Amino acid sequence: METFELGFLTGRVHKLTSAREGPICENPYADLAAAIVKSAVKDYVENQKSLWLGEWRVDKRKLKLLLEKIQLEAFFYSGWYDTLTDLDSDQILAQCRFLGKERAKNAVIKRNHRLVATMMVARSKEVNR
């Protein structure tokens, strides 16, 4: 069961859940609209995480991520988005940027912990020889 908390939102959909869990609203069109917005939010958070984890040099991968970021931001400011929901796009994007940065930071911390653990094991093997 996947749950994506959007407690900072002031619109009519505060919690978007996966389709496997059942309907979010009584109206299937509202469910579809919520699923589209949820997908865009997840894509934007993942995009932000990837941009924060990436190297500073510009290559094809970074250009692709930047293009995806521009496309996602265009969606959040489009009339189509306004048709789907009444949620404030600036607030959603700010929260997504924060969440993407936090996830990138946690990924770096996790990677560093694994690296330190590997180094400690290697060091203990050298000492035990």
Image (spheres, rainbow, N blue to C red):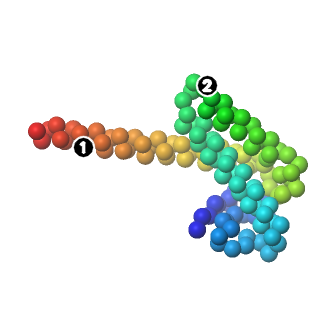
* CA neighbours of label 2 inside 10 A, class few (<14), some (14 to 19), many (20+): few
- Where residue 73 sits, quadrant-wise, is top right
CA distance for labels 1 and 2: 36 Å
Position of residue 39 relative to residue 100, above or below, is below
Label 1, on which residue?
Answer: 121
Residue 29 or 97: which is nearer the viewer?
29
- Work out which residue is located at the far left of the displayed protein and give it: 129
- Work out which residue is located at the far front of the displayed protein and give it: 60
Report the disc number at residue 58: 2
Query: Can residue 1 be seen in this snapshot?
Result: yes
Residue at image position (57%, 37%) is 52
Residue at image position (81%, 70%) is 28
Image-based side of 79 in relation to 92, left or right: right
Numbered label tally: 2
Residue 59 or 85: which is nearer the viewer?
59
- Where residue 30 sits, quadrant-wise, is bottom right
Report the disc number at residue 11: none
Position of residue 2 relative to residue 125, above or below, is below
Image-based side of 36 in relation to 104, left or right: right
- Dividing the image into 4 quarters, which one contains the N terminus? bottom right
- Given the image, on which type of amino acid does mark 1 rest? Val
- Given the image, on which type of amino acid does mark 2 rest? Val
Where is residue 63 shown, x and y percent of the image? 66, 30
Query: Can residue 98 be seen in this snapshot?
Result: no
* CA neighbours of label 1 inside 10 A, class few (<14), some (14 to 19), many (20+): few
The tag earlier along the polypeptide, 1 or 2, is 2
Residue at image position (80%, 45%) is 75
Where is residue 93 shown, x and y percent of the image? 72, 46
- Work out which residue is located at the far top of the displayed protein and give it: 57
- Dividing the image into 4 quarters, which one contains the C terminus? top left
Image-based side of 1 in relation to 89, left or right: left
